[in-house]
Amino acid sequence: MKTVLITGSSSGIGLGIAREFAKTKQFNIIFNGLETNGPEIANEIGKEFGIGTMFSNANMLKPEELRKMVDDGIAKFGKIDVLVNNAGIQHVSAIEDFPEEKWNAIIAINLTSAFHLTKAVWKGMKERKFGRIINIASAHGLVASEFKSAYIASKHGIVGFTKTMALEGAPFNITANAICPGYVKTPLVEKQIVDQAKTHGIPESEVISKIMLYKQAVKEFVTVEILGQAAVLMASDGASTLTGVALPIDGGWNAQ
C-alpha cells in the first residue's frame, strides 16, 4: 500500500479526490481540513473501502503544524508516497481595495503551504526513488481575471513551483504536476452563486451562464470525480514521464 496526503480533503474538491484514491484500494489516506467532523469523514471512508486513514487538522498558515502532520503520517504508515496540495482560499476585490491581510493569507495557504509540505516529504521521496506531487492549481493558474489578484498570483506561482519540482525531482523518480480546473460545483461555489445573484440582481441561473461558465466552451461545471481520476493517473507507477505538466480541466476555457 502506498500513502497519499491530501490537504483540504474533508470537503469539496479535496474530498472528491480522496474518494477516487480510496476507490483504488491501493492507498492509505492522510486527510486534512478544518471541519470538526474530519475524523469521522476519514474513518467512514476507511471503513467503506477497507483502507487505512488518519486525520489532521493542521493549519496551512502554520508551518510547524504542517511538518507535524507529515511526521505523524510517516509514524503511522511508514512513508508518504503522494502529496496532493489542494487546500486553498479565495477573495474577490479590486487591487486598490484588496485587504493586505487577505493577500497574505491567500499566498500563504494557496502557495507557501505547498512549499513547506513539499520540503517535508522531499527527502524521503528521494531516498526511496519514488514520489508523486500533485498541485491543485486552477484555470486561473494559466490565465487571469479581474478582481482576483492574490488568487491569480498564488495559482500562477504554484504552476511555476510545480515546474521547478519536476526538474529537481526527475533524477529521483519524483514527478510533479498541476491540475488546473475551471469552476467546480462545490459548497463554496454554490455559496458564491447565491452571493453573486444578490450582488448583481440577477437569477442564480444567469450567474452560472453569464459569469461563471461564460469563458468555458463546455457550459458545465467540472466534476470532482474527473479531477480525482486525473490525480490518480498522475500518482501511478506508470506516470514516470508525466511531469511538469499544468493540465487544464476547464471545459475549454484555455482553448481561447
Image (spheres, rainbow, N blue to C red):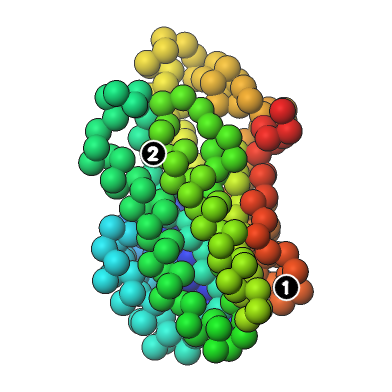
Using the rendered view, name the quadrant where residue 142 is placed: top right
Q: Residue 36, relative to residue 102: is it above or below?
A: below
Camera-nearest residue between 126 and 87: 126
Residue beneath disc 1: 240
Residue beneath disc 2: 150
Using the rendered view, name the quadrant where residue 242 is placed: bottom right
Q: Identify which amino acid the numbered label 2 is placed on.
A: Ala
Q: Residue 18, relative to residue 184: is it above or below?
A: below
The reply to whether residue 74 is in sight is yes
Camera-nearest residue between 147 and 191: 147
Q: Position of residue 88 (x, y in %)?
A: 41, 49
Mark 1–mark 2 distance (CA, rounded to whole Å): 32 Å
Q: Residue 117, relative to residue 88: is it above or below?
A: below
Camera-nearest residue between 89 and 20: 89
Q: Identify which amino acid the numbered label 1 is placed on.
A: Ser
Mark 1 is surrounded, within 10 Å at the Cα level, by few (under 14), some (14 to 19) or many (20 or more) other residues, namely: some
Image position of 248 (left or right of 157): right
Q: Residue at x 35, y 23 (%)?
A: 94
Judging from the image, what secondary structure is the residue with disc 2 in?
A: helix
